[in-house]
Image (cartoon, helix red, strand yellow):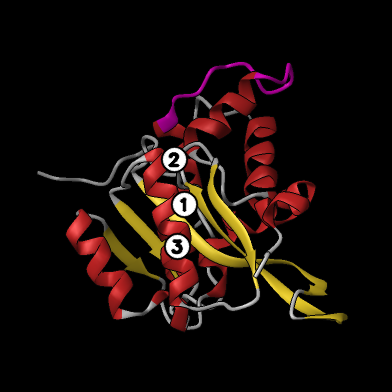
Amino acid sequence: MPKERSDRNTFRKLTEEQKKALLRWRYDNAYRTVSQLREELLTHASTANPVPSESTIARFLRSVNLDRKTLLAKNNHQNKVRLAYEAPYPQYLCLADTKGPNLYVKDPDNPDRVRLAKLILFLDDHSRHVVAASYHFEENEITVMMLFRQAISIYGIPNSLYVDRGSPYMGKSLKRAATILGCHIIHTQPKDCAAKGKVEPHGERMMLMTPLLLPTT
Protein backbone atom coordinates (compact mmCIF):
# COMPACT_ATOMS: atom_id res chain seq x y z
CA MET A 1 0.00 0.00 0.00
CA PRO A 2 1.24 3.54 -0.71
CA LYS A 3 2.65 5.30 2.31
CA GLU A 4 4.35 8.58 3.05
CA ARG A 5 8.13 8.60 2.92
CA SER A 6 9.73 8.46 6.34
CA ASP A 7 12.58 10.76 5.24
CA ARG A 8 10.38 13.55 3.92
CA ASN A 9 11.96 16.98 4.47
CA THR A 10 15.22 15.39 5.59
CA PHE A 11 18.29 15.79 3.44
CA ARG A 12 21.13 13.51 4.45
CA LYS A 13 23.29 14.69 1.55
CA LEU A 14 23.04 18.34 2.61
CA THR A 15 24.89 19.78 5.59
CA GLU A 16 23.56 22.72 7.58
CA GLU A 17 26.23 24.90 6.02
CA GLN A 18 25.08 23.90 2.54
CA LYS A 19 21.44 24.57 3.42
CA LYS A 20 22.24 28.05 4.71
CA ALA A 21 24.30 28.79 1.63
CA LEU A 22 21.51 27.65 -0.73
CA LEU A 23 18.95 29.79 1.08
CA ARG A 24 21.22 32.83 1.00
CA TRP A 25 22.07 32.44 -2.69
CA ARG A 26 18.46 31.84 -3.64
CA TYR A 27 17.29 34.96 -1.84
CA ASP A 28 20.14 37.01 -3.33
CA ASN A 29 19.57 35.83 -6.89
CA ALA A 30 16.42 33.97 -7.87
CA TYR A 31 17.70 33.63 -11.43
CA ARG A 32 20.12 30.83 -10.58
CA THR A 33 19.22 27.35 -11.76
CA VAL A 34 19.69 24.21 -9.66
CA SER A 35 22.77 23.23 -11.67
CA GLN A 36 24.31 26.66 -11.08
CA LEU A 37 23.63 26.41 -7.36
CA ARG A 38 25.28 22.99 -7.26
CA GLU A 39 28.35 24.34 -9.07
CA GLU A 40 28.51 27.20 -6.58
CA LEU A 41 28.46 24.74 -3.68
CA LEU A 42 31.39 22.83 -5.17
CA THR A 43 33.53 25.95 -5.57
CA HIS A 44 33.65 26.67 -1.81
CA ALA A 45 35.61 24.49 0.57
CA SER A 46 33.04 24.84 3.34
CA THR A 47 30.18 23.60 1.13
CA ALA A 48 31.90 21.22 -1.27
CA ASN A 49 31.38 18.02 0.79
CA PRO A 50 29.36 15.92 0.68
CA VAL A 51 28.54 16.40 -3.00
CA PRO A 52 24.73 16.71 -3.38
CA SER A 53 22.81 15.81 -6.51
CA GLU A 54 20.68 18.33 -8.41
CA SER A 55 17.54 16.45 -7.40
CA THR A 56 18.47 16.78 -3.71
CA ILE A 57 18.96 20.53 -4.10
CA ALA A 58 15.66 20.81 -5.99
CA ARG A 59 13.81 18.88 -3.24
CA PHE A 60 15.30 21.14 -0.57
CA LEU A 61 14.24 24.27 -2.42
CA ARG A 62 10.72 22.89 -2.82
CA SER A 63 10.54 22.17 0.90
CA VAL A 64 11.16 25.85 1.68
CA ASN A 65 8.97 27.15 -1.18
CA LEU A 66 11.91 28.52 -3.14
CA ASP A 67 11.55 26.37 -6.24
CA ARG A 68 10.85 28.01 -9.60
CA LYS A 69 7.25 26.88 -9.82
CA THR A 70 6.39 28.41 -6.45
CA LEU A 71 8.27 31.63 -7.21
CA LEU A 72 6.35 32.08 -10.46
CA ALA A 73 3.01 31.31 -8.81
CA LYS A 74 3.58 34.00 -6.18
CA ASN A 75 4.22 36.74 -8.70
CA ASN A 76 2.00 38.19 -11.40
CA HIS A 77 3.34 39.52 -14.69
CA GLN A 78 3.71 43.03 -13.24
CA ASN A 79 5.97 41.94 -10.40
CA LYS A 80 7.44 38.61 -11.39
CA VAL A 81 10.77 36.99 -10.70
CA ARG A 82 12.70 36.84 -13.97
CA LEU A 83 14.12 33.34 -14.14
CA ALA A 84 17.14 32.55 -16.24
CA TYR A 85 16.49 31.88 -19.91
CA GLU A 86 18.74 31.74 -22.93
CA ALA A 87 17.89 30.73 -26.47
CA PRO A 88 19.42 27.33 -27.30
CA TYR A 89 21.37 28.57 -30.33
CA PRO A 90 22.06 31.78 -32.31
CA GLN A 91 19.22 33.12 -34.46
CA TYR A 92 16.66 31.15 -32.46
CA LEU A 93 15.28 34.28 -30.81
CA CYS A 94 15.91 37.94 -31.59
CA LEU A 95 14.82 40.76 -29.28
CA ALA A 96 14.03 44.24 -30.53
CA ASP A 97 13.35 47.32 -28.44
CA THR A 98 13.75 51.07 -28.19
CA LYS A 99 16.19 51.65 -25.35
CA GLY A 100 18.21 54.49 -23.91
CA PRO A 101 20.34 56.30 -23.40
CA ASN A 102 18.61 58.81 -25.66
CA LEU A 103 20.65 61.64 -27.10
CA TYR A 104 20.06 65.23 -28.02
CA VAL A 105 21.89 65.92 -31.28
CA LYS A 106 22.04 68.78 -33.75
CA ASP A 107 18.97 68.90 -35.97
CA PRO A 108 20.05 68.51 -39.63
CA ASP A 109 17.10 70.63 -40.75
CA ASN A 110 17.79 73.35 -38.20
CA PRO A 111 21.47 73.46 -37.07
CA ASP A 112 20.70 76.05 -34.39
CA ARG A 113 18.55 73.55 -32.47
CA VAL A 114 18.96 70.10 -30.96
CA ARG A 115 16.64 67.17 -31.44
CA LEU A 116 15.96 63.99 -29.45
CA ALA A 117 17.30 60.78 -31.03
CA LYS A 118 16.19 57.36 -29.75
CA LEU A 119 18.17 54.14 -29.95
CA ILE A 120 16.48 51.12 -31.57
CA LEU A 121 18.41 47.87 -31.44
CA PHE A 122 18.05 44.17 -32.28
CA LEU A 123 19.76 41.62 -30.02
CA ASP A 124 20.40 37.91 -30.50
CA ASP A 125 19.23 36.20 -27.30
CA HIS A 126 21.79 33.37 -27.34
CA SER A 127 25.01 35.24 -28.09
CA ARG A 128 23.89 38.69 -26.79
CA HIS A 129 25.28 40.04 -30.05
CA VAL A 130 23.74 43.28 -31.33
CA VAL A 131 22.70 42.42 -34.88
CA ALA A 132 21.35 45.89 -35.75
CA ALA A 133 21.28 49.27 -33.99
CA SER A 134 20.77 52.88 -34.90
CA TYR A 135 19.58 56.19 -33.47
CA HIS A 136 16.47 57.67 -35.07
CA PHE A 137 14.48 60.84 -34.74
CA GLU A 138 11.25 59.01 -35.56
CA GLU A 139 10.33 55.82 -33.74
CA ASN A 140 7.88 54.15 -36.10
CA GLU A 141 7.28 50.94 -38.01
CA ILE A 142 9.36 52.09 -40.98
CA THR A 143 12.52 52.49 -38.88
CA VAL A 144 11.92 49.16 -37.15
CA MET A 145 11.49 47.38 -40.49
CA MET A 146 14.63 49.05 -41.83
CA LEU A 147 16.68 47.69 -38.92
CA PHE A 148 14.97 44.30 -39.20
CA ARG A 149 16.00 44.16 -42.84
CA GLN A 150 19.55 45.14 -41.91
CA ALA A 151 19.74 42.40 -39.28
CA ILE A 152 18.45 39.55 -41.47
CA SER A 153 20.49 40.61 -44.51
CA ILE A 154 23.71 40.19 -42.49
CA TYR A 155 22.89 37.47 -39.96
CA GLY A 156 19.93 35.59 -41.44
CA ILE A 157 16.30 35.15 -40.45
CA PRO A 158 15.64 34.31 -36.77
CA ASN A 159 13.03 31.76 -35.77
CA SER A 160 11.22 34.31 -33.62
CA LEU A 161 11.24 38.05 -32.97
CA TYR A 162 10.34 39.15 -29.42
CA VAL A 163 8.97 42.70 -29.17
CA ASP A 164 6.69 44.76 -26.94
CA ARG A 165 3.27 46.17 -27.74
CA GLY A 166 4.40 49.64 -28.75
CA SER A 167 2.97 50.99 -32.01
CA PRO A 168 6.28 50.64 -33.94
CA TYR A 169 6.20 46.86 -33.28
CA MET A 170 2.48 46.21 -33.75
CA GLY A 171 2.11 47.26 -37.39
CA LYS A 172 0.61 45.03 -40.05
CA SER A 173 3.52 45.56 -42.45
CA LEU A 174 6.07 44.22 -39.96
CA LYS A 175 3.86 41.24 -39.17
CA ARG A 176 3.31 40.44 -42.84
CA ALA A 177 7.00 40.76 -43.68
CA ALA A 178 7.95 38.45 -40.81
CA THR A 179 5.26 35.93 -41.82
CA ILE A 180 6.53 35.80 -45.40
CA LEU A 181 10.07 35.24 -44.14
CA GLY A 182 8.95 32.50 -41.74
CA CYS A 183 9.76 34.49 -38.59
CA HIS A 184 7.26 34.27 -35.74
CA ILE A 185 6.59 37.54 -33.90
CA ILE A 186 6.03 37.22 -30.15
CA HIS A 187 4.63 40.15 -28.18
CA THR A 188 5.11 40.74 -24.46
CA GLN A 189 2.21 40.77 -22.04
CA PRO A 190 0.47 44.14 -21.61
CA LYS A 191 2.24 46.52 -19.19
CA ASP A 192 5.19 44.14 -18.85
CA CYS A 193 8.04 46.53 -19.64
CA ALA A 194 10.68 44.40 -17.91
CA ALA A 195 10.10 41.40 -20.16
CA LYS A 196 12.93 42.47 -22.46
CA GLY A 197 15.30 43.64 -19.75
CA LYS A 198 18.21 41.90 -21.49
CA VAL A 199 18.27 44.71 -24.04
CA GLU A 200 18.81 47.44 -21.43
CA PRO A 201 22.57 47.00 -20.73
CA HIS A 202 23.38 46.92 -24.43
CA GLY A 203 21.93 50.38 -24.95
CA GLU A 204 24.66 51.81 -22.73
CA ARG A 205 27.29 49.81 -24.59
CA MET A 206 26.11 51.34 -27.82
CA MET A 207 27.19 54.75 -26.50
CA LEU A 208 30.74 53.77 -27.48
CA MET A 209 29.57 53.56 -31.09
CA THR A 210 27.52 56.77 -31.01
CA PRO A 211 29.25 58.46 -33.99
CA LEU A 212 28.39 55.45 -36.16
CA LEU A 213 24.77 55.25 -35.04
CA LEU A 214 23.63 58.87 -35.12
CA PRO A 215 20.82 59.74 -37.54
CA THR A 216 21.81 61.65 -40.62
CA THR A 217 18.37 62.62 -41.86
- Give the camera-side residue of 92 and 212: 212
Q: Which residue is mark 1?
A: 67
Q: Residues within 10 Å of mark 3 (few under 14, many from 20)?
A: few
Q: Residues within 10 Å of mark 1 (few under 14, many from 20)?
A: some
Across and down, in percent, residue 39 comes to 57, 24
User: Left or right: where does residue 214 sit relative to residue 41?
Assistant: right
Front: mark 1 or 3: 3
Q: Which residue is mark 2?
A: 58
Q: Which residue is mark 3?
A: 146
Specify the label residue 182 is tagged with: none
- Give the camera-side residue of 86 and 54: 86
Image quadrant where one finds the N terminus: top left
| Residue 80 is inside the magenta segment | no
Across and down, in percent, residue 88 comes to 36, 37
Across and down, in percent, residue 194 comes to 57, 68
User: Left or right: where does residue 36 sit relative to residue 178?
Assistant: right
Image quadrant where one finds the C terminus: bottom right
Across and down, in percent, residue 191 comes to 50, 83
| Residue 44 is inside the magenta segment | yes
Look at the image and give the residue range highlighted in magenta: 43-54
Q: Are marks 2 and 1 in contact (CB under 8 Å)?
A: yes
- Give the camera-side residue of 8 and 202: 202
| Circle nearer the N terminus (1, 3) | 1
Q: Residue at x 50, y 27 (%)?
A: 12
Helix, strand or loop: magenta stretch:
loop
Q: Secondary structure at mark 2?
A: helix
Q: Secondary structure at mark 1?
A: loop
Q: Residues within 10 Å of mark 2 (few under 14, many from 20)?
A: some
Work out how far the residue at label 2 is from the one at label 1, CA to CA, in angstroms: 7 Å
Work out how far the residue at label 2 is from the one at label 3, CA to CA, in angstroms: 46 Å
Amino acid type shown at disc 1: Asp
Front: mark 2 or 3: 3
